[in-house]
Amino acid sequence: MSDLPGIVITGASGRMGQMLIRTVTESDKARLVGAVERAGHDWIGQDLGTAMGGAPSGVIVTDDPLEAFSGAQAVIDFTAPAATREFAKLAAQARLTHVIGTTGMDEDDIAALKPCARHAVIVRAGNMSLGVNLLTQLTKKVAQALDADWDIEVIEAHHNKKVDAPSGTALMLGEAAAEGRGIALSENRESGRDGITGARKRGAIGFSAIRGGDIVGEHDVLFAGLGERIILRHVATDRAIFARGALKAALWGQDKAPGEYDMMDVLGL
Ligand SMILES: NC(=O)c1ccc[n+]([C@@H]2O[C@H](COP(=O)([O-])OP(=O)(O)OC[C@H]3O[C@@H](n4cnc5c(N)ncnc54)[C@H](O)[C@@H]3O)[C@@H](O)[C@H]2O)c1
Ligand SMILES: O=C(O)C1=N[C@H](C(=O)O)CCC1
C-alpha cells in the first residue's frame, strides 16, 4: 500500500470535481481514495472511473462522507456552502486537511469553520490559481499608490451555470483593493446597479458580474481616473489551474498545525 497522501474529492461529478479527480489521479504525489456526491445522485454506488466514462478505478462513489474520510489525509471540496459546513465538521473529526474552493459562503458559513480549524488544517480561497493570487498582490499595490479620485471596479465574467455573484475571486480582489486603500470593503462595496442609481459614491469599490456560455473565469480590476485608466486582468482558460492549486494546498497542509490558511500561505506570496 502506497504511503502517498490519500485524497477524497467531494462534489465528484461537478465541473471542478471531475477536474480534481483527473488531477489527483494523474499526480505522482497523491492518491485518490474517495469520492463523495450528494444523496440521490445517479453516481452513488457506481465505480468512479466508469461513471466518468472511462476504465474502472476501484473507487466507489458514496454519499457517506464520514466513511470516505476515514483513512484519508485530505479532502478537496468544491461544492456548495451548506455542504462545505458539514464537511468541515467531519474533516475536523477525522483530522484531515480540508481544502475549500467553495464560493458564495456568507459570514455565518465562514464563522462556522473557526471551531473546525482548532482540529484540522483548513485552506480556503475563492481562487486557487497562481495567477489570481499574484493579481491580488498587484491590486493591493496599485490601490495603495492611488487616491480615491480613482474609482475601483472589479468586473468578472463566468459561465451561465454559476450560482453566486460576485465571484469568490472578485471578492478577493475587492478585499485586496480595500486593504491597499486602507478602508473596509464591507463599508464601501457597491454592486447591482439598475435604474436611477445616482452618481457613484467617491471611494466606493464596485462589482459588475457577467454570466454567459462556458466562460471559465475572467477578472478585470479597473482603476478609472480622470483622463486615464489602469486595467489589471486575469483570464482563466482551463479549470486545471484551480485543481492544481487545490492539490498543492492539500499536500502543503500535511505537516502544518491546525488553523485557517489561504493560498497566499501555500504559495508563499
Ligand atoms: N476556489 C476556486 O479556485 C474555484 C474554482 C472553480 C470553482 N469554484 C467554486 O467551486 C464550487 C463548485 O463549482 P462547480 O463549477 O464545480 O459546480 P458544480 O455545480 O458543477 O459542482 C458542484 C458539485 O457539488 C455537488 N454537491 C452539492 N452538495 C453536495 C453534498 N452535500 N455532498 C456532496 N456533493 C454535493 C453537486 O452535486 C455537484 O456535483 C462553486 O462554489 C464554485 O464557485 C472555486
Ligand atoms: O466556475 C466557477 O464557479 C468559478 N468560481 C470561482 C469564483 O467564484 O471566483 C473561481 C473561478 C471559477
Image (cartoon, rainbow, N blue to C red):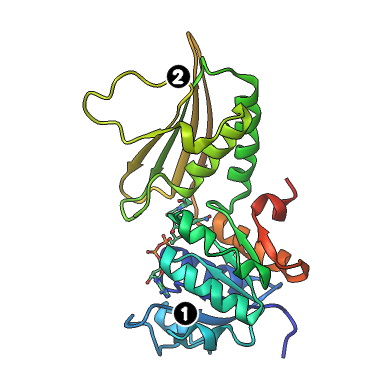
| Residue 102 in view here | no
Which quadrant does the C terminus fall into? top right
**Alpha-carbon distance for marks 2 and 1?**
47 Å
Query: Is the residue indicated by label 1 positioned so its CB lies within 8 Å of ligand 1?
Result: yes
Position in image of residue 55 (x %, y %): 48, 84
Position in image of residue 190 (x %, y %): 39, 32
Position in image of residue 54 (x %, y %): 45, 80
Residue lying at the far top in this picture: please name it: 227
Picture residue at 45% right of the left edge, 74% below the top: 12
On screen, residue 38 above or below 110: below
On screen, residue 198 above or below 60: above
On screen, residue 215 above or below 64: above
Which quadrant does the N terminus fall into? bottom right
Q: Is residue 266 left or right of residue 102?
A: right
Amino acid type shown at disc 1: Val
Q: Circle 2 sits on which residue?
A: 202
Nearer to us of marks 2 and 1 is 2
Amino acid type shown at disc 2: Arg
Please rate how many residues cluster around mark 2, counting C-alpha atoms within 10 Å: few if below 14, some from 14 to 19, many from 20: few
Q: Secondary structure at mark 2?
A: loop
Q: Circle 1 sits on which residue?
A: 36
Q: Is residue 109 left or right of residue 24?
A: left
Position in image of residue 111 (x %, y %): 53, 59
